[in-house]
Image (tube, grey):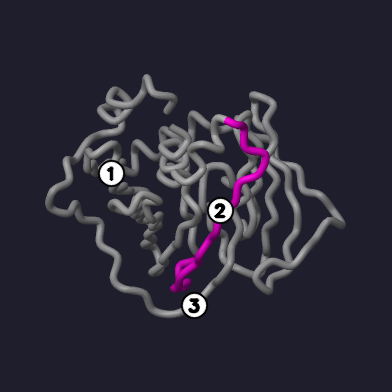
Amino acid sequence: MKKLSFILALLVSSMLFAQDFEGTIKYEINYEDLTEEMKAHASMLPDGFKIEVDKEMSKVTQPSPMGGNPTVAISNQKTGESLTLMDVMGQKLALKISGEEKKEMEEKSEGDVDIKYIDGDEKEIAGYNCKKAILETKDGSEITIYYTEDLPNIDVSDQASGIKGFPMEITTVTDMFTTITRVITIEEGKVDKIKMEVPEGYDEVSMEEFKKMFGGMGL
């Protein structure tokens, strides 16, 4: 259920955009040091996603490696409300989170991560100069992030929450593989209007219902 965990990482992200930013950001996802077990399932792992931003509204789209419906996460930065559309084992679900629920989730996670900024370790990604930071979690895990201060502050996932810039590259080491999520293109400009609407054919569920449905499967 690593893919499902990645979906939730997108879902709970703060998506803090500058009010005047509009455009599309594309990320690629690469994997290293896969265990033998994960090598057999490598084709099922997501290989990228894109973020469309229209001022306070954002839309994250992650295509399905199996050719099914993409996972879509829509957020309203002003209200904190979010809607995630996903196809999980043939079930088309629409997971809604209110601004109040989002605030509670953020309060529960406060203090879970210690951020260390590394001086002198910089590199260029997609044409932007990036600085390095290391996030240490309560369970002892480390997440390496390269960020730029030349773009609006965007939390693309909870893994990069709190970073004082735009996360351009996120490296996460797990027992099963190492994930490297990196920006490949940034295009400023108008995007299609982003609406927080549940499409026909999707069943709307709450976070509590979603956890009950998949909580015992490594979520």
Above or below: residue 55 compared with residue 197: below
Which residue shows up at 61% across the image and 44% down it?
Answer: 179
Q: Earlier in the sequence, mark 1 or mark 2?
A: 2
| Residues rendered magenta in the picture | 18-36
Give whichever of 115, 34 is nearer the camera.
Answer: 34
Q: Earlier in the sequence, mark 3 or mark 1?
A: 1
Calculate the distance from the C-alpha at mark 3 to the C-alpha at mark 1: 30 Å
Tell me the tag on residue 188.
3
Q: Quadrant of residue 60?
A: bottom left
Residue 117, position as x, y percentages in the image: 77, 48
Question: What secondary structure is marked by label 3?
Answer: strand
Above or below: residue 100 compared with residue 151: above
Which residue shows up at 39% across the image and 79% down it?
Answer: 190
Whether tag 3 and tag 1 are in contact, CB under 8 A, the answer is no
Residue occupying the far right of the picture? 120
Q: Quickly name the residue at label 2.
A: 29
Q: Residues within 10 Å of mark 3 (few under 14, many from 20)?
A: few
Q: Quickly name the residue at label 1.
A: 87
Q: Quadrant of residue 57?
A: bottom left
Calculate the distance from the C-alpha at mark 1 to the C-alpha at mark 2: 20 Å
Q: Please tell me whether mark 2 or mark 3 is closer to you in this view.
A: 2
Residue occupying the far left of the picture? 200
Whether tag 1 and tag 2 are in contact, CB under 8 A, the answer is no
Q: Earlier in the sequence, mark 2 or mark 3?
A: 2
